[in-house]
Amino acid sequence: GQNIDQPTEMTATEGAIVQINCTYQTSGFNGLFWYQQHAGEAPTFLSYNVLDGLEEKGRFSSFLSRSKGYSYLLLKELQMKDSASYLCAVPPVLGGATNKLIFGTGTLLAVQP
Amino acid sequence: DAGVTQSPTHLIKTRGQQVTLRCSPKSGHDTVSWYQQALGQGPQFIFQYYEEEERQRGNFPDRFSGHQFPNYSSELNVNALLLGDSALYLCASSPRASGNTGELFFGEGSRLTVL
């Protein structure tokens, strides 16, 4: 089966850097997604990692270590608008289906002035 | 280009009633999935529709059923509502060709409250 763990809540200061961790245990591996979800809104795609290493995309970067079952999302130069829930998700390898993802509970990030 | 649209945005029902939620996928997408998101939790996969058939199902009882129409839009039906069915119901779409490693596009959801 699949299990995904991420912290429930985090707080950071505007302009700072924050790292949101995600650990996973899966039967096989088919990549890892990060989504952002503002309160009352739809989740939106941030990143997809399938190979080890860091992928940078503007202020947001995502890291993957397949051997450790570990990923993190790094947010730089935090802005108030980055206050949101950040969801770690993996597609199942066995019994997978198009657009089926297994999500973690999400990490609620609060950015303070 | 409209993204994924869902209706209604909010609704309130009482226990035992039935509800129908609707979803129109993003233009060019033929595969639709439904997710249930309880407060403070991540979305949970309910089922997926492609070519008007349910292709895969998550761990949800038969009270949850769905339908996909020839224009790829979809409905989620929940019968005999329970208090625990209160949640945000999200619809997600993608092209089938993207497999399960492509980006999902979500609608803003239908928030169901069961009293």
Image: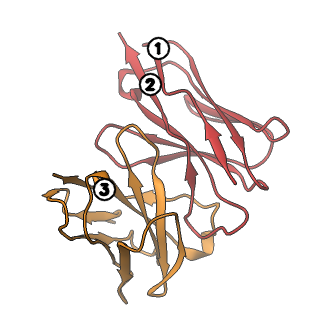
Chain colours: A red, B orange
Disc 2 on helix, strand or loop? strand
Relative image position of residue B41 (x, y in whole percent)? 43, 41
Q: Chain of mark 2?
A: A
**Which circle's residue, 2 or 1, is located before the other in the chain?**
1
Residue behind mark 2: A109
Question: How many residues crowd around disc 3 within 10 Å: few (fewer than 14), some, or many (20 or more)?
Answer: some
**Which quadrant holds the N terminus of chain A?**
bottom right
Q: Is residue A65 visible?
A: yes
In this rendering, do the residues under marks 2 and 3 share a single chain? no
Q: Chain of mark 1?
A: A
Q: Nearer the viewer, residue B88 or A35?
A: B88
Residue at image coords 73%, 50%: A26
Q: Give the vertical position of B18 relative to B84 (above or below).
A: below
Left or right: where B75 falls relative to B95? left
| Cα–Cα gap, marks 2 and 3 | 26 Å
Dot 2 and dot 1 residues touching (CB under 8 Å): yes
Q: Give the vertical position of B87 relative to A21 (above or below).
A: below
Dot 1 and dot 3 residues touching (CB under 8 Å): no
Residue at image coords 38%, 82%: B68
**Which quadrant holds the C terminus of chain A?**
top left
Give amino acid for label 2: Leu
User: Would you identify the image quadrant in which residue B23 lies?
Assistant: bottom left
Question: How many residues crowd around disc 2 within 10 Å: few (fewer than 14), some, or many (20 or more)?
Answer: many
